Image (cartoon, rainbow, N blue to C red):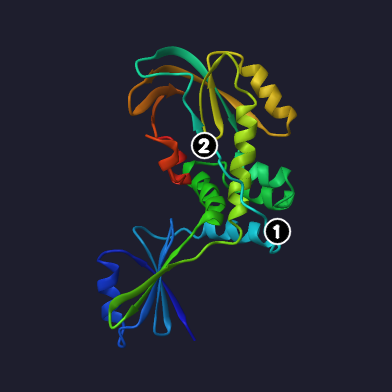
Amino acid sequence: MKHIYNKIRTEAITDFLKEESETGRFKMKITNYTISAEVEEEKYFFADEPMNKTAFIFYNMMKKDIGGEVRPEAKNISYFDFSGVQAGDKIEECYCVDINSAYLSVLKNENIISRETFKKINDRTRKNDKTKMDRLKSVGMFASNPSIINFENWEAANITNEKNPFSWVFYEACQKTNEIIKSCIDENFLFYWVDGIFVRSGHREIKQKIQKMGYACKIEKINNLEIFEKNITYLKAGKEKILFLPIKEKKIKFNFQHAVEI
């Protein structure tokens, strides 16, 4: 019977596996969020801190709802648009209209996941940034394309990539969110980033428009917005936030973890 171990990473993983393998034959799997390995009859999961299984639980809940359905992936999705601002701009007061649990809400409204699954995940992830990250990761896992490294005689023999057949779920959520945000661009537009649109004014009208589409959202007051060459800084609820600007959209591979403000 294969045993499964969760380990905190304190040394090079390959060095650890070489010590554990008697044959020099083992397999390593690397994703955006995890590194796992199969050695003889054992399986190991590696992390820099104690592993949180919540994101995996959420992922499996949604995957069960999908029921094996496979669709084409949405293409050419824009996760941001900073065309309403430029380096050097300073705006004392503006507003951000943010879609609540945007990607998860899309999956519910498009009948990709059940309302019951949505409620269970959403209710558990509204408390703090850590639980919010679990929700973001769980949707992002659908787009995971893990690298598989097979070792022979303790050396990497070949590397292959797997593609998640349900990657369309992630991109469907991205595309629909992008369509909603883009439909709200008007003369007050400053920029948008993923599921939040920043505007000088007209925020109440935007909120009403998004709500009519079936999505809950909130208005956040923004102060001291400053645009720099590589980042944007501002105050929200009295706390300083930093948003790092992507250099070129075509070079960006979106990662949920990078969408959380610092």
**Identity, as a three-letter code, of the amino acid under mark 2:** Tyr
Query: Along the line of sight, which residue is nearer the eye, 56 or 18?
Result: 18
**Which residue is drawn at the image coordinates 67% and 47% (left, top)?**
107
Residue 79 percent across, percent down from the top left: 52, 36
Say which mark, if any, is on residue 79. Answer: 2
Vertical side of 201 occupied by 212: above or below: below
- Residue 152 picture quarter: bottom left
Query: Along the line of sight, which residue is nearer the eye, 104 or 75?
Result: 75
Q: Can the viewer see residue 49 in this picture? A: yes
**Which residue is drawn at the image coordinates 55% and 30% (left, top)?**
196
**Identity, as a three-letter code, of the amino acid under mark 1:** Asp
Residue 21 percent across, percent down from the top left: 31, 83
Q: Which residue is mark 1?
A: 65
Residue 115 percent across, percent down from the top left: 73, 48
- Residue 26 picture quarter: bottom left
- Label 2 neighbourhood size at 10 Å, few (<14), some (14-19), many (20+)? some
State which mark lies toward you, 1 or 2: 2
- Label 1 neighbourhood size at 10 Å, few (<14), some (14-19), many (20+)? some
Q: Can the viewer see residue 238 in this picture? A: no
Query: Along the line of sight, which residue is nearer the eye, 170 or 114?
Result: 170
SS for dot 2: loop
**Which residue is drawn at the image coordinates 72% and 51% (left, top)?**
116
- Residue 246 picture quarter: top left
SS for dot 1: helix
Vertical side of 199 occupied by 18: above or below: below
Residue 255 percent across, percent down from the top left: 46, 46
Compared across the picture, whether 66 is left or right of 133 comes to right
Q: CA distance from mark 1 to mark 2?
A: 26 Å
